[in-house]
Image (cartoon, grey):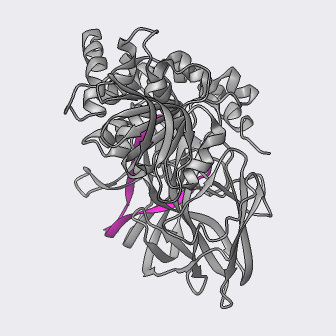
Amino acid sequence: MRSSDLVLGSALVACLLLAACGVPTWDPALHPNGDPTPADAGEDAWLKVHMQSGDLFVLSEWDQPGAAGDLTGRGVLFDADRVQRATGSHSIGRDSIALLETNRREVVSRFSLSGLSVFTTLTALTTVVCLADPKSCFGSCPTFYTTEDADRPLAEGFSSSFARALEARDIDRLGLVAQPGSFSLVMRNEAQETHAIRHVKLLAVPVGGADDVLLSTDGRLFATSATRRAIGCDAGGLDCLEATQARDDVEYASRADEHDLAVREEMILDFGPANGDLGLVLSARQSFVTTYVFYQSLAYAGRSAGDLLAALERGEPGAKERVLGVADELGGIEVLVQRSDETWELAGSFNEAGPIAADQQVVRLGERSHDSLRVKLRMARGSWRIDEIALATLDTEVEPTVLVPDSVMPLMGTDADDDGRLEDPEQYLVTSQGDAHRLWFTIPNADAQHLFLDSRGYYYEWMREGWLTEEDPVLAAAVLLQPAEALRMMAPGFKEIEPRMEELFWSSRFRR
């Protein structure tokens, strides 16, 4: 991107994202430091109230609304152009609020519990590792553990849902078989985030006569009685067979390109003769490329990150596509099958987000008959860690038994009675850094069960103080308007931290 394009992008980004080019909007970088705007809120506690209309209240005093009441407080009202319109006392209808934004973590949970979305713009509470390198901070949606292995996460929920507007259901294979009776999982918030969890359920399938039960990329479950490994694996001249033979934490992982984080790599697998209703089984997790890109994008946005999230919550036309542009540019793991004429046909893709726990999914290849089945994986170089690859014959689709928690017991953090919140689809269980809950389930008294985790919710990342030093509306515009160029600009910074990012990331995980 030319420098002139970047300057133009910074001037247009608010129009394109915040108001869908309907009215002029305010870019904080274009105002002097003395302007009494949200970007100059100072050290005292404040609450920004982003409205569905695009208006903005900045309150210095406020009261929490009741179940159906208004939010009241004292402060300044700005219109969509960020021109000051009124000061003094205000009463704000809760249904007209798109997003709340505050610089005090202690107000987050009580507003979230009242059904309002809250973004924390600044926190002074952080680990030594995060202070030294803010892009390496541990970040995660809810992480889930068993009692037997309390330090190794089995799964992480809804990792792509970093705003209420992106709330989604996420199904993860737990990779264990549970016997009839009581079964529990521990759910933790181990990062500087606010989690709003709508439900956590288990999907249970009897072991029966199937060798295994596989989760497809479209959320369906299939029994399989035949799974086999590749007989050859080539990744750009490197033998990748040994690293992908079993789900054993021995992963295939490459390094990102130093000039462009979106540069692709390919892996070609040979399975020999194969026929039937086939699926490619992948166990993989994202590397820290996506984590770095997400954090760097927030850093560029700086104090206008709340405006971007508010645009998502308002449903501004095109806002979702622009905010997710860099993630789409990185993409998932594409799965292609070689035809008889040696050309390649796209069969599907693996897109499970998150660097914490590898998930296993099957990409359906359909009915096929090959004397020598060759499959190609195509992905952004250095963006994925692949633990296992296999070929499965899919027998029948199976319907799971849905298990809801019998009880939800707080272990750390809030003392509130959380029973029932995960059962009511209109409520959320809201957690902050360090909170932990034990979820108890009853496994049916019939047979041992394959278990899958079914979670739904969203989260808001807390803005780190160290990120604010990199606030740059020009580069933020590039992320939104020219994601391919943004990934090229971010490549040198990521390469500098890449060798040590895994160690730093895990060492900043927060436990009370």
Q: Is the magenta region chiefly helix, strand or loop?
A: strand
* Magenta region: 357-384
Q: Where does the image place residue 424, in percent across and percent down from the top left?
A: 53, 71
Residue 194 to residue 47: above or below:
below
Q: Quadrant of residue 79?
A: top left
Nearer-the-camera pick, 342 or 417: 417
Q: Where does the image place residue 505, in percent across and percent down from the top left?
A: 67, 35
Instruction: Please say whether residue 257 is visible from this viewpoint.
Output: no
**Residue at left 43%, top 81%?**
396
Q: Is residue 152 magenta?
A: no
Q: Is residue 365 magenta?
A: yes
Q: Where does the image place residue 293, in percent across and percent down from the top left?
A: 48, 31
Residue 349 to residue 295: above or below:
below
**Residue at left 70%, top 21%?**
132
Nearer-the-camera pick, 129 or 86: 86
Q: Quadrant of residue 181?
A: bottom right
**Residue at left 51%, top 57%?**
457
Residue 8 shown left or right of residue 493 in the figure: left
> Looking at the figure, which quarter contains the N terminus?
top left
Q: Where does the image place residue 246, in percent across and percent down from the top left?
A: 62, 58
Instruction: Please say whether residue 363 is visible from this viewpoint.
Output: yes
**Residue at left 51%, top 17%?**
470
